Image (tube, rainbow, N blue to C red):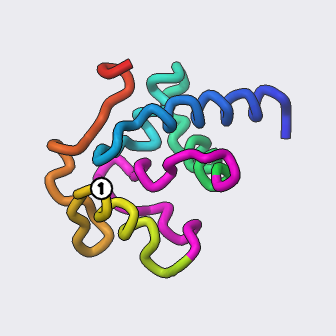
Amino acid sequence: MKPETLNFFEKVYQVAKQIPYGRVTSYGAIGNYLGAPRSARMVGYAMNGSVSKNVPAHRVVNKKGLLTGKQHFKGTNLMQQLLESEGITVIDNQIQDLDKVYWDPTKEL
């Protein structure tokens, strides 16, 4: 990977570490905050590699609230279980009341 890609990943991790307990954000929102619109997929790649970085990757979902990254967590429903342990309701891999738990780094940071 190019050094600038690694730098971008580290920036993604810095933002994700600030997502409050019981809240979620989207891949695209993190990309927008970092000044890289249309980089949602790259943010997703960063989340996939965040396991050893102590990053709450379970709090990052797609823009519709779908748990699109759940296959990267150990166990069948670990991502959902982590979210539910924080009080977030998930039905059929989708966060319920997304507007109430959504955290936008552009507005919050």
Q: 72 left or right of 68?
A: right
Element marked by disc 1: loop
In the rendered image, which quarter contains the C terminus? top left
Q: 94 left or right of 37?
A: left
User: Residue 30: percent from the left, percent from the top?
Assistant: 47, 33
* Residue type of the residue flagged with mark 1: Glu
Question: Which of the 4 quarters of the picture holds residue 66?
Answer: bottom left
User: Residue 77: percent from the left, percent from the top?
Assistant: 43, 76
Return the residue nearer the eye: 1 or 78: 78
Q: Can you say whether 109 is above or below 83 in the image? A: above
Q: 5 left or right of 23?
A: right
In the rendered image, which quarter contains the N terminus? top right
Residue at coordinates 30% horizontally, 44% vertically from top-left? 23
Residue at coordinates 51% horizontally, 36% vertically from top-left? 17
- In the image, farthest residue toward the bottom: 76
Crowding around mark 1 (Cα neighbors within 10 Å: few <14, some 14 to 19, many 20+) is few
Q: Can you say whether 83 is above or below 76 in the image? A: above
User: Residue 60: percent from the left, percent from the top?
Assistant: 43, 48
- In the image, farthest residue toward the right: 2
Instruction: Identify the magenta region.
Output: 51-74
Question: Which of the 4 quarters of the picture holds residue 83?
Answer: bottom left
Kindly identify which residue carries mark 1: 86
The answer to if 45 sits in the magenta stretch is no
Q: Can you say whether 81 is above or below 52 in the image? A: below
Q: Can you say whether 50 is above or below 14 in the image? A: below
Q: 104 left or right of 29?
A: left
User: Residue 89: percent from the left, percent from the top?
Assistant: 21, 63
Residue at coordinates 29% horizontally, 48% vertically from top-left? 22
Residue at coordinates 34% horizontally, 44% vertically from top-left? 21
